[in-house]
Amino acid sequence: MVAGYWVNQDGLVLQYGTQKAVPEMGGDYLIYGEIREVEQYIPLVPTTWGSGGVAQGAPPTSLTFVGTGTSLQAGIQSLTQMFPLQLTAPQTASGSALTLTNTQLFIESVWLETVQVIAPTSNTMTVGLVTSTGGSTPAYVQIAPNAGFQIIGTSAATGLSLGATIAPIGTQVEFNIPGATGTVYGGGVPTATTGNGGAWIGAVPAVTTTLPTGAQTPLAQEAWISTLTNGAFTSGLLKLRIRYNIYGNISY
């Protein structure tokens, strides 16, 4: 059967044929309290889940974003996992008082866990957010501001190096300060990462990506997670965890 996909007028990617057999990589989970957690596997090589299944493709091997091809070419490995966006500017105290009239989105931390050993260890990775333009000629576009580097990395030069300290199975990496190095936990004394956490860790800025005329809203309201790398891998499977909460006058 022919494999393929198309984007409907709501901007949703619909798969048909053998592509529908590709397993889902991500999910959004409730943690007790106000925290929510996104979990998504990032296969660094084509990965088949179960005997005889269809392999989930590896992310692009270039840090240059391509939005005119398939979802995988745009770095999207999970088509059902969406991340919410901040539609208004984050509110701060005025004078000595704080009034939260708008919905506020806050990313507490971003974690990576090495499930399968990574090789080669010279490659780097960035993780950002992507949406679809919809319309008659749909394409993918990186969310702005900080396009391509909201979750991991603040530029291509500060993408995360998947080096020897991150490569071993069981290694965990935590980012909790925007644009700063993370902490690597993997036995022995924790070390700092080579490469920075995303620019959106903490208070998430207002999205500035506009959608084409005729869309239900002029602003993108949610986005897919997009992973880009600078080279091909011979092994590697990561799990990405994004812990966030929504507070204030919640409207979505």
Image (cartoon, rainbow, N blue to C red):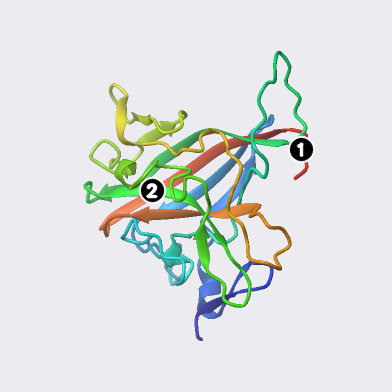
Task: Give the residue type that dot 1 points to.
Answer: Ile
Position of the C terminus, as image quadrant, is top right
Amino acid residing under circle 2: Thr
The residue depicted at 34 percent of the width and 56 percent of the height is 63
Q: Secondary structure at mark 1?
A: loop
Numbered circle sitting on residue 250: 1
**Residue nearer the viewer, 208 or 15:** 208
* Mark sitting earlier along the chain (1/2): 2
Look at the image and tell me whether residue 57 can be seen.
yes
Q: Is residue 191 left or right of residue 204?
A: left
In percent of width and height, residue 203 lies at 58, 32
- What crowding class fits label 1: few (fewer than 14 Cα within 10 Å), some (14-19), or many (20 or more)? few
CA distance separating discs 1 and 2: 30 Å
Where in the figure is residue 194, as x and y percent of width and height?
Answer: 28, 35
Do tag 1 and tag 2 residues touch (Cβ < 8 Å)?
A: no
Q: Residue at x 42, y 40 (%)?
A: 112
Specify the farthest residue to the top. 96
What residue is shown at x 72% (from left), y 58% (from top)?
Answer: 217
**Residue 43 x, y percent position in the rendering:** 39, 56
Kindly indicate the quadrant of the structure image that contains residue 243: top right
Residue 106 in the image: state x and y as whole percent.
60, 34
Residue 63 vertical placement versus 90 (above, below): below
Quick one: label 2, few (<14), some, or many (20+) residues within 10 Å?
Answer: many
Left or right of 64? Residue 41 is: right
At a point 71% along the width and 68% down the height, the residue shown is 214
Task: Compare residues 139 and 227 and report the one nearer the observer.
Answer: 139
User: Quarter-wise, where is residue 157 in the image?
Assistant: top left
For label 2, the residue is 126
